[in-house]
Image (spheres, coloured by chain):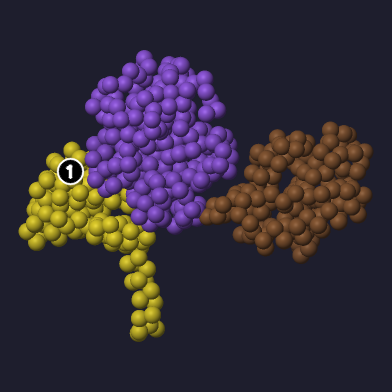
């Protein structure tokens, strides 16, 4: 899978470090500032390219036509908005994730149908990982100091969680389900949200709650890895 | 044998089909023989980002094979038997430095052309990058340009 | 007509002066107060210092009741952001956007903005001038 990240600031850099470790992902990072680009290249190597990621001709050159995901995370909302629309409408990139810096711009981004709007790199990672159907449970980013991690998992048929409202589930202590992705789109759940087979949830959990939550959502038993 | 050869156990030479790169191969082979060092040759195919890195590039592969064959021939004329590698990368300089690090070479020998595109001498992108980033020794071999004015 | 103009460069200032002379109600926005020096003395519209991508400034400039919005600031992306805001969030009927990059101008034209590319226009004009009859 080929991914283009536009913006080599802290968020873009953080993403690059994460994505670099995933197998089968090819990543290009586009950075507008020459000095920043060369500093990034010293660390990340040839995945870093210096250029304007909102420019159509330039994106063409870095392979936008074969990209399956573009992530626009510059500090400039105008650049992000334009890049996202160029990605979607010119290059028809199937998935586009965009960072919105000024919360007042969020409504506009939504209205223009710009896919996903997030402000922090771990949330972006959560959304990327959520697009990997081959994994039912993917530890995303160990929030080391707090002993937390962000996980995504898909609700399986016959699991404890299937068909239940969140308020009726006895979740392990400290588990916070932050996003539920249904066939109709992503939503911020509340107690009345009912989990359906095939829904994807993204949760922040204490590390030790992994297995218990997985058992509830996917039906897999912690001691029974082979089934 | 000059003392500076004593630390050299393994040498890498990038081959791009230019006469300069073949001269570097000759120098490297001669050095390898005297220092009893290993010689590695690579040819880097630069793949544009618009296509996947591992895309099959028949023409480039064939050309690369031919370059390496000639380089291997030159090395063997100097008494060193060696087999070159073809590498596909986004940027040749980066690939050369990477290969050097991976193989733990302690010298990279580059042949450079006498190149004055705008009336000013230019080193070229690859030597520039390798000089800046390689942890190993870098030797530059430059012969006079065939038509260079004599002073 | 009530017109909000973002960017008081040569084009923005010239257009503002002309529209004001044509009896339209004009408000000009620029991030740099020094830019207003380009307005001719007879310009009787409003001038506001601030960014056209900033909602507070847009509202202050009267975007909610404006009939037209013109984005002729220096950056293509900022012009597009402000224009899409004017159109989608504030319901401005006529939105004109300067986009220097011809490809981006084409795309956002397709997406509903009235874009024009001075680069493209300049190339056409220069080309036509080269082959115009009557050269010496």
Q: Is C98 located above or below residue A2 in the figure?
A: below
Looking at this rendering, what residue extends furthest in the left direction?
C23
- Depth check, front residue: B102 or B27: B102
Quadrant (top left/top right/bottom left/bottom right) for the N terminus of chain B:
top right
Label the purple chain with its letter.
A
Q: Residue at x 66, y 54 (%)?
A: B45
- A65 left or right, relative to B54: left
Q: Is A224 located above or below residue B98 in the figure?
A: above
Q: Residue at x 35, y 71 (%)?
A: C124
- Depth check, front residue: A24 or A184: A184
- A166 left or right, relative to A70: left
Name the residue beneath numbered marker 1.
Answer: C58
Quadrant (top left/top right/bottom left/bottom right) for the C terminus of chain B:
bottom right
- Give the quadrant of residue B134: top right
Give the secondary structure at mark 1.
helix
- Give the quadrant of residue A117: top left
Q: Chain of mark 1?
A: C
What shade does chain C have?
yellow
**Is residue A146 in sight in this rendering?**
yes
**Looking at the picture, how far across and down is residue B22, in whole percent?**
80, 55
**Looking at the picture, how far across and down is residue B57, in whole percent?**
64, 59
How many C-alpha atoms fall within 10 Å of the one at disc 1: few (<14), some, or many (≥20)?
many
**Looking at the picture, how far across and down is residue C125, in whole percent?**
33, 71
Q: Residue at x 54, y 36 (%)?
A: A22
Label the brown chain with its letter.
B
**Looking at the picture, how far across and down is residue A53, in whole percent?**
43, 48
């Amino acid at each position: 899978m080929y991914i283009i990240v536009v913006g080599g600031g802290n968020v873009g850099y953080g993403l690059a470090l994460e994505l670099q470790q995933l197998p089968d992902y090819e990543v290009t990072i586009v950075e507008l500032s020459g000095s920043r680009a060369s500093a990034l290249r010293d660390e990340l190597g040839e995945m870093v390219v210096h250029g304007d990621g909102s420019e159509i001709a330039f994106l063409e050159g870095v392979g936008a036509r074969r990209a399956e995901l573009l992530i626009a995370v510059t500090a400039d909302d105008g650049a992000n908005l334009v890049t996202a629309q160029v990605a979607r409408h010119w290059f028809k990139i199937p998935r586009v994730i965009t960072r919105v810096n000024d919360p007042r711009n969020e409504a506009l981004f939504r209205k223009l149908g710009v896919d996903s709007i997030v402000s922090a790199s771990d949330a972006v990672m959560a959304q990327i990982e959520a697009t990997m159907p081959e994994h039912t449970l993917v530890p995303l980013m160990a929030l080391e100091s707090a002993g937390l991690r962000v996980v995504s998992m898909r609700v399986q048929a016959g699991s404890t969680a299937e068909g239940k409202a969140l308020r009726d589930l006895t979740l392990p202590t400290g588990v916070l389900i932050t996003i539920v992705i249904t066939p109709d789109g992503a939503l911020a759940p509340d107690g009345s949200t009912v989990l359906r087979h095939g829904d994807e949830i993204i949760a922040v959990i204490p590390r030790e709650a992994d297995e218990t939550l997985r058992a509830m959502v996917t039906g897999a038993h912690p001691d029974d890895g082979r089934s | 044998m000059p003392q500076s050869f004593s630390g050299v156990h393994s040498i890498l030479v990038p081959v791009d089909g230019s006469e300069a790169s073949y001269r570097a191969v000759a120098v490297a082979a001669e050095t390898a023989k005297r220092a009893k060092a290993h010689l590695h040759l690579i040819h880097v195919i630069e793949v544009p980002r618009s296509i996947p890195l591992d895309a099959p590039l028949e023409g480039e592969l064939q050309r690369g094979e031919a370059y390496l064959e000639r380089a291997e021939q030159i090395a063997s004329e100097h008494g060193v038997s060696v087999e070159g590698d073809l590498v596909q990368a986004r940027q040749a300089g980066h690939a050369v430095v990477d290969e050097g690090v991976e193989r733990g070479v302690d010298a990279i020998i580059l042949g450079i052309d006498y190149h004055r595109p705008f009336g000013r001498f230019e080193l070229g992108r690859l030597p520039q990058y390798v000089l800046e980033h390689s942890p190993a020794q870098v030797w530059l071999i430059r012969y006079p340009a065939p038509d260079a004015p004599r002073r | 007509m009530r017109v909000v103009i973002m960017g008081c460069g040569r084009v923005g200032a010239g257009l503002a002066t002309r529209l004001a002379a044509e009896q339209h109600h004009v408000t000009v926005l620029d991030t740099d107060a020094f830019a207003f020096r380009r307005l001719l003395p007879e310009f009787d519209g409003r001038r506001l210092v601030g960014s056209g991508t900033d909602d507070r400034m847009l509202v202050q400039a009267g975007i909610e009741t404006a009939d037209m919005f013109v984005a002729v600031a220096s950056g293509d992306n900022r012009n597009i952001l402000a224009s899409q805001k004017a159109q989608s969030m504030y319901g401005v009927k006529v939105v004109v956007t300067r986009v220097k990059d011809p490809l981006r101008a084409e795309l956002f034209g397709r997406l509903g903005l009235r874009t024009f590319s001075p680069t493209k226009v300049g190339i056409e004009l220069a080309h036509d001038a080269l082959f115009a009859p009557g050269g010496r």
